[in-house]
Image (cartoon, rainbow, N blue to C red):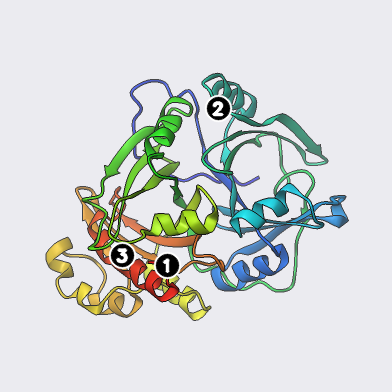
Amino acid sequence: MQAFDTNETLLTPDAEDFLPLNGTDYLELYVSNAKQAAHYFQTAFGFQPLAHAGLETGLKDRESYVLVQDKVRLVLTSPLKGGTDIGRHIDQHGDGVRVIALWVDDATAAFEETTRRGAKPFMQPTREEDEHGYIVRSGIHTYGDTVHIFVERSGYTGMFMPGFTEWNPHYRPKPVGLKYVDHMVGNVGWNEMNEWVNFYANIMGFKQLISFDDKDISTDYTALMSKVMSNGNGRIKFPINEPAEGKKKSQVEEYLDFYGGSGVQHIAVATDNIVETVMALRDRGVEFLKVPDTYYDDLLDRVGNIDEEIETLRPLGILVDRDEEGYLLQLFTKPICPRPTLFFEIIQRKGAKSFGKGNFKALFEAIEREQELRGTL
């Protein structure tokens, strides 16, 4: 079984890490049509087919497709009949992230430690077996209807987990260079950011990496606040956003309205060559936010010398920011669902550990232009 971790290290914990996390194991999205969503992620994002579960594997209420690209695993799940919890989740939220699964050495210990510290149980430690061995999973609730599943898979040699069979279709578009999950952003309600910051600090042992207030993240019309939480080894990073007062409705407010509560706003996926990745995605129909051309006029004055040519970045709309450690390049898709909720970020880090603070104003103005077109600003 391939280990899906990352090599990034951001933090050195002050004390023993009581909840060691090896990386992101998988992300499960509840979607209205898993078969079509799987085709989309194959075609547009270059994910490769891995495994399938449904009627053929004995499930009567749901169907799941598992796709993989390097260290990123997506599970796309749809209900097979009415009246299910999955269907109710989709009815309230639309397509969105239900499960952020975290790879651990001991799923039972992870569950016991987090629930002892106050986490609401979602899934008791459960051993699942087949001819390839066993895994243990457990889970807790987090913001909104999002849950964390702890996955222990050292005793398993199969392709994904028990209950799934190999999915080996003829259709296999090439990958686009996506490597691993860099971070995942959660949007929460008014005055709830600190509640969830404390949840990750007290229950999961995370540290606050950085914070942004409404002076950092604002335009002439909208604002929000954000704090970035990271686990002990820095492999898991969760920025938490909440709305802030502005003249018009912010992107977080729009998200909360259409998602029907708190949830995952975007998934940031790393690449080693953002230019090639973005060109491939664009050619496959993925749409990106676009900043004004003037953004690039003084770019080098703001960020200093970079390896890339400005005239290569400009037509693609790729943003650049620098911190004390280096620089990063990033670009954001438009929402990938009918509701203006979930989107992806493509990010390439060249030393930088930050999150593109210097791009906030340009980025949020681009989001506001999309909101204005939707009539939701």
Residue type at mark 1: give it: Thr
Secondary element under disc 3, as helix, strand or loop, is helix
Query: Can you tell which mark lies on residue 363?
Result: 3
Mark 1 or mark 2, which is nearer to you?
1
Q: Nearer the viewer, residue 349 or 377?
A: 377
State the residue at coordinates (77%, 43%): 162
- Looking at the image, residue 176 sits to the left or right of residue 9; the answer is right
Residue 365 screen position, x and y as percent: 29, 67
**Mark 1: few/some/many CA within 10 Å (<14, 14-19, 20+):** some
The first of marks 1 and 3 along the sequence is 3
Q: CA distance from mark 2 to mark 3?
A: 35 Å
Query: Can you tell which mark lies on residue 376?
Result: 1
**Mark 3: few/some/many CA within 10 Å (<14, 14-19, 20+):** many
Which residue is label 2 attached to?
A: 119
Residue 156 screen position, x and y as percent: 71, 39
In the rendered view, would you say 342 is above or below 198? below
Query: Can you tell which mark lies on residue 46?
Result: none
